[in-house]
Amino acid sequence: HENILQEYFIGAIDQGTTSTRFIIFNGTGEPVAMHQLEFKQIYPESGWHEHDPYELISTVNECVEIATKKFVEMGHTVQDIKAIGITNQRETTLVWDRETGEPLHNAIAWPDTRVAHLVREYKAKKGDKDLSQICGLPLSTYPSAMKLVWLLEHVGKVKEAYDAGRLCFGTVDTWLVYNLNGGKEKNVYVTDSTNASRTMFMNLHTVKYDDELLGFFGLDRELLNLPKIVPSSCPDSYGTMAYGPLKGLKIAGVLGDQSAALVGQQGFTPGSAKNTYGTGCFLLYNVGEKPTISSHGLLATIAYDFGRARKPVYALEGSVAVAGSGVKFLMNNLGFIAHSDKVSELAATVDDNGGCVFVTAFSGLFAPYWIDDAKGTIFGITQFTQRGHIARATLEATCFQTKAILDAMELDSGHTLSNLAVDGGMCNSDICMQTQANIIGIPVDRPSMRETTALGAAIAAGFAVDIWSEFSELKAINQKDRTIFEPNTSPEESEKMFKKWERAVSMCRGWLD
Ligand code: ADP
């Protein structure tokens, strides 16, 4: 059976916050060929963060072309690729004109905080109403909803298209599927339920758009034609590639990136979790076939939705806005390192943080705090402070937020994790993963193949075209050569560090102009 699986291939497009990848996996979950391209981060003003919609597509096209070329050069044939899966950065908001297919603004990326003032206004309007009971998300700068409201209020072209009933709104999955199918002619206009659950327009219980939510944001359902919500694994909803070396190939799976990582780590049983350290850091905890609405600052979301006879599976999520982007900040803004992978070396030049705590609240603070008016703040600087201390404090910031999220998750679920499966770019830092194990007091478990997000998209597509039909068939995938980081400090020491972090958090709020 394994020999047959090695002859089946699935392509996975991973359109992340900082880079785009295309990876071709075989049926045993091994990456065979891949290409990756970084793209431009646009910061027009403090707190604003955009992407060029055309670049999101052009990097996908180029990665598909180059990885497929490598695949063919290895002696494989394109016909052996059975389907394509897509995984994408979530919440990032795009708008385009249905008649021309052209974007009407840059994509507003998920960490963008331009809507902080609007959020205040809408919080006042909301009064005691708890929207998270309907959609699982608290009102904040993070979901797509306020980003779309901002576009309607500030960009004339967007409002005109909306008034004329021509406006298309989409998260990155919708934009990619629409364009890969050839755009306006085919007009394939869909979203998967994991992505839809991040907009704040979807009712988490019914997995349908909700009139009360749309009404709250002042949106008219007749004018705003929303993409159809379909399951994450689906043979007939996402169309086919309209051009390029994979022309005619079916797109059969779509998952938001954090959902894809959970699937790639095989977090299929309630009680399993994973933590992905990419641009931001996201812990997803599988709660089963009914949503758990958090009372401790976590989000409720769809984990994955494999369709057919399967019910959607839900997760509790702890989202941290800044993780790897903190490392990039040390590189691009402070010039401390020449490349992200040098941060461990710099952190290793000192024994500890030297008394520094860095609250990396560049986009306010997300879970479990939700402080929109927090700003990045470094505490504890003296003449003693070196770059290494600040590098350590940067890595620790994500580890402390993960600890706060795990504490909240325990309160919401009544369950304690016994180990933490990790992935994402920043998990390559051994020093960061050891620190994480020390701060949470449980082992951290890192796979050797770290492309779990792309693997998750491949799994969603593979299920749709019957390469696999049961989760148990995936058991052997990516289990070899995992690294386990065991905690090696005393719980008292970790507790002391965490107390200091909490004090720093309490002092970094109240900075909205
Ligand atoms: P995304 O999908 O959000 O674009 P990735 O999972 O590709 O993110 O991870 C990229 C992030 O990981 C970058 O922000 C980068 O700074 C960080 N990163 C990459 N390699 C390392 C490393 N060796 N040590 C620490 N951080 C790293």
Image: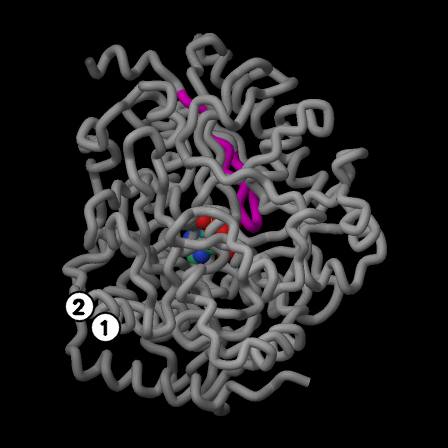
Give, as a three-letter code, the residue at label 2: Gly
Give, as a three-letter code, the residue at label 1: Leu
- Residue 133, position as x, y percentages in the image: 40, 66
Q: Quadrant of residue 143?
A: bottom right
- Residue 320, position as x, y percentages in the image: 44, 65
Q: Say the numbered circle drawn on residue 277.
A: none
Q: Name the residue under label 2.
A: 414
Q: Indicate left or right for 419 with 171 as reference.
A: left
- Viewer-nearest residue: 386 or 131: 131
Q: Which residue is drawn at 63% across and 52% down?
A: 93
Q: Indicate left or right for 281 with 479 as reference.
A: right
The vertical placement of 492 against 306, above or below, is: below
Q: Indicate left or right for 137 with 334 as reference.
A: left
Look at the image and tell me whether residue 430 can be seen.
no
CB within 8 Å, label 2 to label 1: yes
Q: Is mark 1 within 8 Å of ligand 1?
A: no
Stretch in magenta: 10-21
Helix, strand or loop at mark 2 = loop
Q: Is mark 2 within 8 Å of ligand 1?
A: no
Which quadrant is the C terminus positioned in? bottom right
**Dot 2: few (<14), some (14–19), or many (≥20) neighbours within 10 Å?**
few
Q: Residue at x 42, y 16 (%)?
A: 82
Whether residue 338 is in magenta: the answer is: no
**Dot 1: few (<14), some (14–19), or many (≥20) neighbours within 10 Å?**
some
Whether residue 20 is in magenta: the answer is: yes
Q: Name the residue under label 1.
A: 411
- Viewer-nearest residue: 192 or 434: 192
**Marks 2 and 1, how far apart in space?**
5 Å
Q: In which quarter of the image is residue 469?
A: top left
Helix, strand or loop at mark 1 = helix
- Viewer-nearest residue: 164 or 468: 164
Q: Which residue is drawn at 64% across and 78% down?
A: 121
